[in-house]
Amino acid sequence: MGYVLYQPSMPGRRRWVPCLLLAAWAVLASAPAGAGLGDWLREKLDDERPPPRDYVILINYELGMHCTGFDFSYCCVLPPYNSILAQVVRTERHADRPRLLAADPRDPTVLVDGKRRFRLAYTHEDPAGVPNTYSATKKLDYWGLGYRGGQLPNHEFAHLYVYDPADGGSHPRTTADRKKRHIGLDTPIHINEGPTGQHVGKGYLRYSGREGTVVFTDSPVMENVPIHLTGPGIWEALGLPLTPFNDRFTSLITVQERQVQPFQRAVVTLVDADTGEPVIDSSGQVVRYFGVNPIDIPNCARCHAGPEANGEKYRKYQEEYAFWRGIRGASDWYARLKAAAISILEIHDDRNGTNFLAHWPAGPGSHTRLGRDPVVCQDCHADNIIGRLVSRHVGEMRPEDVRPGAPSLPPPEHLISPLSEAIHKVHLRARPLGDAEGLAGSCQACHPGHRSSRTLQDFPLDEEGRYTYRKGDIRGTRGCFTQRDAHGNPDFGGEDLARPDPLTPVGRYLLLEVMQDDRRGRRGLYCTHCHNLLSRALYRADHLASPFDPEAGRSLRALPLERLAQALGMDLHRLLHFALDPRVPARGPDTRSGVYHVWDRTGQRVADLARIRVDAEGRTLRTPPDEDGDRSLVLLDPDPEAKGGVPLSYDEATHGRDYWLAPGEPHCADCHAPPFVEDLGGANFPIDQPGKYALMRHSRGHRGITCQGCHESTHGLYPVNPAVDVTGYQQAAQLNPDGSHGPVKCQACHRVNAQGVPTRHPDYIARDSVYWKDYGKAVELQHELR
């Protein structure tokens, strides 16, 4: 119309020209400064809504929860290890399509966006904004502890190693021990830093590059086993020694349990690469986001600092408590924690023939009272979660750690069990803690149970270790796992979510028969509904060609429950109540339930890892001896169902078996139908495998965005319950323009229409397509665009 406003041959219309020009000027003048005219007109005509920010930073910690102690002077079950993982998206706010931003190839701390150069400064704070920037001395008794002539932190990760680029880096060309750079030994771990040398409270995230961050370890049959700490294209700060205490913390010896704040904020700020000044985007706000970095303390003291675990037989805990409480003036909780550690060691000595308390009590302080170095569980027990793949045989234990001739000492050839298996078996056998419906209360009783409110109200064990939910539903408690995330949050249905995901028959059963109750309303899932025998069986049966089309390969996941039971060689009742929804007795011992047999693998088939080479007579082949005389099995194919060679099981490849690896962990695909499933595995072998689903923490759902970027981490999946995890609740709201609490919606990065559907991608979402006005279908499409 503008081109015909003024035409000299049409004098009758000339009087409209000033009016139309004036109107056009008024409309154009209302366009925001810096906006393209085309973009602005589309916004008006289509009711198009741009992202509110120029940049979005998606932050998570891959495990969803880390559980550790803060005093390692007596024993260490898990070392301090939290991480910040992030992706940075330049949004569609200024018309260009969104894209993930990477690093300068010459400097992994410099983020590049065109000609602009930034860094990602990180720190920690509690949910109230109080800084949490250090751990040593006051908050964490770790540095300064001696161990075998060195320092404990340098020993914790010494089984992991890397190679210099000259020796192949992440693709090593050698197995020579002298070429391995062991973490902690060759690269000492300094105060307030983790194994990668990054500080817990300050620094810049590093880019993981095209291959991700990989370290190596040794297994019983192979050297140079890769452990993928992060995937490609991740901004990271790894292995940070984070505690649940802010910087106002004064002293360990006077610590109160109400000071534990498990859901810390990992704060990441985009700063100028040269000046370090925070970047302010076109919205006028600093580009600063936070994510959840969960860190909590187990609840051992509830039982082990009292008679429930010790009975009349074990009494050393009483002396230990009296020493710290009466003589040293410690807080009640600190004294109970020290007493619990002594209880655990005393019981272990009695039942396993060890000699850990031979010199206790030996001195007046934490570092001397045990009369020996701290007991590090993974020195004997394999533990995949920290990459320790080798257990000792009893005959290989240090002489000072055993009592020769003790009736409970196993024979020298006995292989010590994986740590996860040992801990779970002994507790489930002794105290399964069945609730009114038989759910195993011991899961919540032992694992982290603190919450953002700093209270343990309705925790299932009282301070004397008595179980209080025998007549209740354990899902009524609140903690890291119960009532926290989308699967356990009873208020899940109140969020503005897209249509429910398509579910497998297993998923539909859990939704309709377990999560919901006509009398009591929504109750959510419990630990044993995911970590169970059926999850492992479904994984073993898979051999997939595509994550989206199980029929293109082989899978049992879409079978009706009756046919699924038949395929697994059991009746329907056993499938439902032993393998899928297992129940335990109210009191121990329990050696028969499906929960117990998740950890007691007697008679069970552990998944195959890969295929290895054999000679013409079927004998396994090994590499020629290296300069140290070591030989490894020869990997033929990481696909355990490939042709040739013979299969090697996880049980043979790692003494840690399949715990915490893809064969032993639950998957989204157990309940959710495609496309709401993980990627195919293989990229993180041996953590996952070709032809099988990868773990959610290693999967990407939309153009390189990690699944955890939009959904948060396992056990903390959006939307979370603010009564448990206020940090995760607030994190989602800062990302979603409408303030909703997750998952992350399209408008965080895209220009969208009134239905929230992206508008600038006609090659995928045309105006006349089914997606244009249906947000749920658009979300489904995004999960297919990988």
Image (tube, helix red, strand yellow):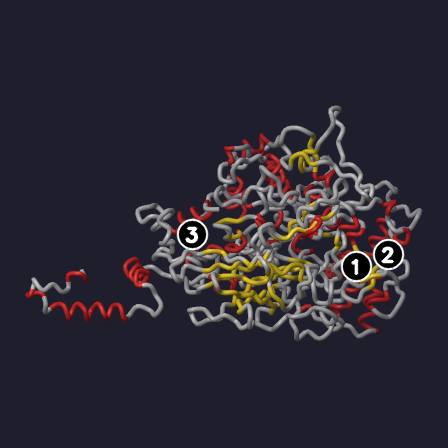
Question: Which residue position holds label 1?
Answer: 75
Residue 370 placed where, x, y %?
86, 63
Specify the amino acid type for callout 2: Phe
Q: Nearer the viewer, residue 276 or 413?
A: 276
Q: Is residue 85 visible?
A: no
Residue at (90, 54) in percent of width and height: 400
Q: CA distance from mark 2 to mark 3?
A: 55 Å
Residue at (46, 60) in percent of width and height: 90
- Tag 3 near tag 1, CB within 8 Å: no
Q: Earlier in the sequence, mark 3 or mark 1?
A: 1
Please tell me whether mark 3 sits on a helix, a strand or a loop: loop
Where does the N terminus fall, quadrant-wise? bottom left
Quarter location, residue 126: bottom right
Question: Which residue position holds label 2?
Answer: 356
Residue at (61, 32) in percent of width and height: 568
Quarter location, residue 249: bottom right
Question: Which residue position holds label 3?
Answer: 498
Q: Nearer the viewer, residue 266 or 281?
A: 281
Residue 73 placed where, x, y %?
80, 63
Neighbour tally class for label 1: few under 14, some 14-19, many 20 plus, Cα within 10 Å: some
